[in-house]
Image (cartoon, helix red, strand yellow):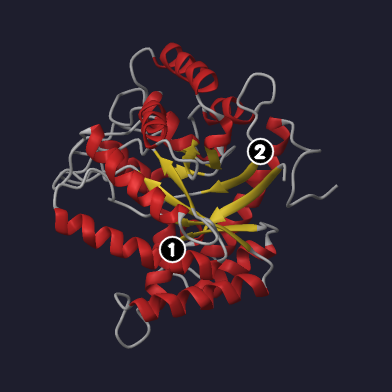
Amino acid sequence: MAYKPAIASLSLGRAWAHDLLPKFTAASTAGLPGIEIFFEDLLYLASSLPGGSASAINQLWAARRIRALCDSLSLTIMALGPFSDCEGLLSPSARRAKLKELHLWLEIAKVLGTDIIQIPCTFQTVGVTGDMDVILRDLREIADIGARKSPPFRFAYENLCFGTFNDTWEKAWAVVKGVDRENFGLCLDTFNIAGRGWANPASSDGTIENADVVFRESLRGLVREVDVKKVFYVQVVDAERLSTPLDESHPFFVEGQKARMSWSRNARLFMCEEERGGYLPVVSVLKAICDEKEGLGYKGWISMEFFNRSLLERRSEVPTEHARRAAESWQRLRIVMGWDRRISGIIDD
């Protein structure tokens, strides 16, 4: 495998607004060979049965339905996520409940045919601690449970730019090194890396202070420090430059929610959509991850995880429009990155 494009299932429309069949059909028709299953879609499908989405039986049924649909459309399920809020847990009962949930997720992932479960850093502020010993304890146990399965499972840890404790790639890498398990690695996301290390949607110019210099050094550190074998997959998207700072007067503002999270939920874009307002240095991030000479030299799945207010629109055209935009983004990206001879999927040559 060189580079293969995938798209997260939510990027084709939120579960309560758009059914799976038109979403997955749109991805397949657009020529996207991979799909990253957003657990919300599985739960929403499971909720259609008596007993609802909380039923393990219903969730496994939903997983079988999703697998059959993807197989019929020649879509490869390359990851399942997000397995959220599983680190730094203070309550023993909450920790036990999360581990019980994990065992079900592993059954579901096996049905789906993927060995990767994505874990984002927590963005909760209650019932959690940033104590690294506690975080590593929780994540090591998860990794060890997954490793004992046959076949074993891998876990891809991701920094969120609005995370409570581990909001940068540097902190996420420190977690991965601390967990120190072969099956515990990184999901590197261009938006979340640039969205914390370069951008600030609450500032007047949309950036942090001295952004270019700070971020250039950060990317040099990524290339210097990260072991590419620990990069399990990559997510790529950009985001809009907001016309006004995201403060209390902004329409995206939510009380008690970080500005970066509100921005993330409403204003992400596909890569190479500068005409829609994309402004993050995400190509620089991807080059640091993928370039063979000056980067890590990563090869593998490139998944488009796209949150935007447009996902809530109930127009039937939304899945097709988003799949088309994703395919166009991939075409542009392969030119920018010089991938014409090293990619799989959506090749018109």
Image vertical order of residue 307 relative to residue 291, above or below: below
Give the residue displayed 44% in from the left and 55% down from the top. 146
How packed is label 1: few (under 14 Cα within 10 Å), some, or many (20 or more)? many
Residue 235 visible in image: no
Identity, as a three-letter code, of the amino acid under mark 2: Lys
Instruction: Give the mark, 2 or 1, whose residue is nearer the N terminus.
Output: 1
Residue 119 visible in image: yes
User: Left or right: 196 with respect to 253?
Assistant: right
Question: Could you say whether the residue bearing mark 1 is in a helix, strand or loop?
Answer: helix
- Residue 310 sits in quarter: bottom left
Q: Which mark is residue 106?
A: 1
In the rendered image, residue 264, in percent from the top left (x then y), is placed at: 37, 43
Identity, as a three-letter code, of the amino acid under mark 1: Leu
Give the residue displayed 24% in from the left and 34% down from the top. 133
Q: Are marks 2 and 1 in contact (CB under 8 Å)?
A: no
Q: Which residue is mark 2?
A: 299
User: Left or right: 196 with respect to 77?
Assistant: left
Closer mark to the observer between disc 2 and disc 1 = 1
- Residue 317 sits in quarter: bottom right
In the rendered image, residue 85, in percent from the top left (x then y), is placed at: 27, 50
- Front residue of 345 and 256: 345
- Residue 97 sits in quarter: bottom left
Q: CA distance from mark 2 to mark 1?
A: 25 Å
Furthest residue to the right? Answer: 349
Give the residue displayed 27% in from the left and 40% down from the top. 135
In the rendered image, residue 225, in percent from the top left (x then y), is placed at: 50, 21
User: Left or right: 304 with respect to 95?
Assistant: right
